Amino acid sequence: MFVRAVTAALVIAAAALPAASVAEPLALEAKIPLGDVAGRIDHLAIDLKRQRLLVAELGNDTVGVVDLAGKRVARRMTGLKEPQGVAYADSADLIYVANGDDGTVVWFEAADFTPAGRVKLGRDADNLRFDRTANEVVAGYGSGALAILDAASGTRKAEVRLPAHPEAFQLAPAIRIFVNVPDAQQIAVVDRAAGRQIAQWGIEARGNFPMALDAEGGRLMAVYRSPPTLAVFDTMQGTPVAAMRTCDDADDVFFDRLRKRIYISCGDGAIAVVQQDGNNYHEMARVKTNAGARTSLFVPELDRLFLAVRARGHEPAAIWVYRPDS
């Protein structure tokens, strides 16, 4: 089922909804310096057990380990090759890192960062997701594939082929995986048990990189870069229920279930905050950040949004910590 049903009228109508009169939906609480980190910063992950934020410092070939309580870098993991994805598998107490340059996924003991294993997938190993229920780590890579690894051993259990390189993806109940495949101009729907793609969704836009899932509400959120558009899909029908213009060069999006809000971090120097009211969505604020700061992580257990801000001018690279309003 390939949905191309969002019209210009829908986009305009959603974008025209009035903004809510909320002063500051995200308050900047702290800036945690990352030290001598240059170039692009990619994805983030959380080790809740130790209150550590894991930062894929792609331009540095390192992963920074940030002590959130102490607001400092506690460790820097080296010897990596363009780390893009990072995940903490709490059931195995392992840190997984996907390397774009050599196409490997490597993993480390979280307690002391001892190397624990390595698997070669293929070029451009990218996003990682940990599935606690299945005790698996899913990795996107290459010209179109997802590799499913056993979280305890790193053993490759299965592989799913896709029409092009996967960007963000979400693991859904009922054994489905939703995958952004921007080069194929689609959202791929994967049946995990069958190990294959069963549907494709989309709208008339290009560059769908970030994705978020509200599993309880049955809504999937994908953000496109051209034109910059937030699209919301019904996960049962695959049909778009809303679309609206948003900030440019988005790379991460998260759903705040408590407040029914969407946070979109964009390279144009802003975080768009979108309020959900049923099937209606409106942008309630656009929080100014720094140009190029487009990767982030919302951690519901801590009720904080972490934004990776690359070095710029005299300002060093840092993690900016935002507290949502109550």
Image (spheres, helix red, strand yellow):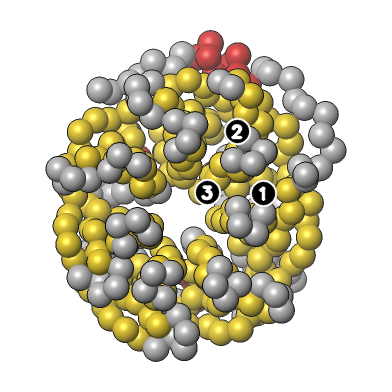
The residues bearing labels 2 and 1 have C-alpha atoms spaced at a distance of 12 Å
User: Is mark 2 in CB contact (under 8 Å) with mark 1?
Assistant: no
Identity, as a three-letter code, of the amino acid under mark 3: Asp
Number of the front mark, 1 or 3: 3
Sequence-wise, the earlier of marks 3 and 2 is 2
Residue, x 60% and y 47% (percent of image)? 265
Label 1 crowding class (10 Å Cα cut-off): few <14, some 14-19, many 20+? many
Residue, x 33% and y 35% (percent of image)? 187
- Residue 44 at x, y percent in the picture: 52, 63
Residue occupied by mark 1: 269
Give whichever of 95, 5 is nearer the camera: 95
Q: Looking at the rendered structure, which numbered label has been put on residue 252? A: 3
Identity, as a three-letter code, of the amino acid under mark 1: Gly
**Up/down of 7 relative to 29, above or below:** above
Under circle 1, the secondary element is loop
Give whichever of 21, 130 is nearer the camera: 130
